[in-house]
Image: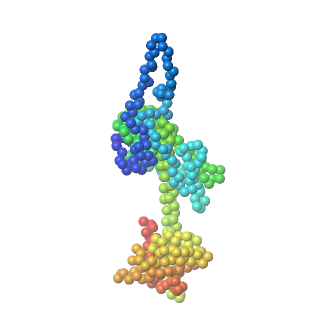
Amino acid sequence: MVVKKALICAIPAAFVLVGCAGNDDRARSDYKYLEEQQSTPLMVPDGMEMPLQRSEYAIPKVKDNPENVVGEDLVITAPVQVLTLVDGSIRPQDGRRASIEFDVLDQNGADQSDQVWESLWNYLRNNQIQGRFWDKEGGTLVTDWFVADSQADPAYFWGLEDYFMDRRGDLEVKARYVFNLELSKSGRTAKLSAAMVGFERYLDSDLERSTPTSVERDNFTVNFLNGAVFQYQKDVAYQQRERVKQERRALALSLQTDEKGNTSVIAAVPFEQAWDHMFDVLTQAGFVVEDRDKNQATYFVNVPGSWSFSNLFSTDDGVLELESGDYKLFFGDRGKTTSISIFDDDNKPLSSKKVTKAYNALKASLDAAEK
């Protein structure tokens, strides 16, 4: 395990701004009140009665309890909230501060619960945190001890920045957590929660205490869970992008000219797949998709008067080959492949030369998506 130390001397302004609380959200003073003592009891001369005493201004004794923090340890910032970063996620009303519920079935009905575990392990590896115990069937993952670094991972300290603001010295916050993943009976949703199971705070290598305050426990735990959820959201987005790339790659566009001399674009995929993916391909190629009619298997597109992809439709001398205006793309279902015929606004098929120019733009759009 790589141990990192957090040297808390000063925090950049940008770091403070990204947090949930500003500099004024922490109790600040010279803390002289901590030295206040109860005044000497009133001395009554012999032969006189003690006047009525009132207790409103008595200084109570602070009980030796980690929850009773005072002075520079007192944080009055608002509690950090669980971020619902994943599509369809909610914060369950189960009394646990650090928990989130979300769908684990993707649009195609595939189970993504294994992806949740993979993302949790990715999150630990990316932060150089070791796992101590994992029970996949039981839905439990326990981390080893790790020391967080406020400079390397400021998100872990959101809502607690001011906690370190006036600190001088080598401050370490050491912790361990347990993740719990609970699948619903339907298997459609999952609830991910985190809990702190170990805490130690050191100043200049001296252990200050091993029990967190409620603010430390809640905010650190929620931040830790948010980091894991963000990793899952990022991994799912990456998998989706890769799947779209593979499906677009399968389009394998080509040109075909029939016996009448009409040239069309051929997609090497069935109609449904071609219909779904050509919207993004056309948009990225510079076309404006104004409407679609699946019953007529037609895309209604427009070529603007000036656009960044015009060079794809021009000759070497810069003359625009495909004039601005409205066009129609007719999709023909050919079983395993799909034909795409391009017509102008008068329902006249484009010349082979212009179809070739349009094909080159679509092909360039697909190639750009691969990068």
Q: Which residue does the image show at 50% across and 59% down from the upper left?
A: 237
Q: How many marks?
A: 0
Q: Residue furthest top?
A: 47
Q: Quadrant of residue 296?
A: bottom right
Residue 9 horizontal side relative to residue 160, left or right:
left
Q: Residue 321: horizontal and vertical position, in percent? A: 42, 83
Q: Is residue 25 above or below residue 103?
A: above
Q: Is residue 100 above or below residue 268?
A: above
The front one of 287 and 281 is 287
Q: Residue 143: horizontal and vertical position, in percent? A: 49, 42
Q: Which residue does the image show at 59% across and 57% down from the upper left?
A: 105
Q: Residue 354: horizontal and vertical position, in percent? A: 45, 83
Observer able to see residue 328: yes
Observer able to see residue 61: no
Residue 104 horizontal side relative to residue 125, left or right:
right
Q: Which image quarter holds the N terminus?
A: top left
Q: Which residue does the image show at 42% across and 40% down from the upper left?
A: 26
Q: Residue furthest bottom?
A: 260
Residue 330 horizontal side relative to residue 123, left or right:
right
Q: Which residue does the image show at 43% across and 79% down from the upper left?
A: 305
Q: Residue 350: horizontal and vertical position, in percent? A: 49, 84
Q: Which image quarter holds the C terminus?
A: bottom left
Q: Residue furthest right?
A: 185
Residue 33 horizontal side relative to residue 293, left or right:
left
Q: Quadrant of residue 337?
A: bottom right
Q: Is residue 366 above or below residue 33?
A: below
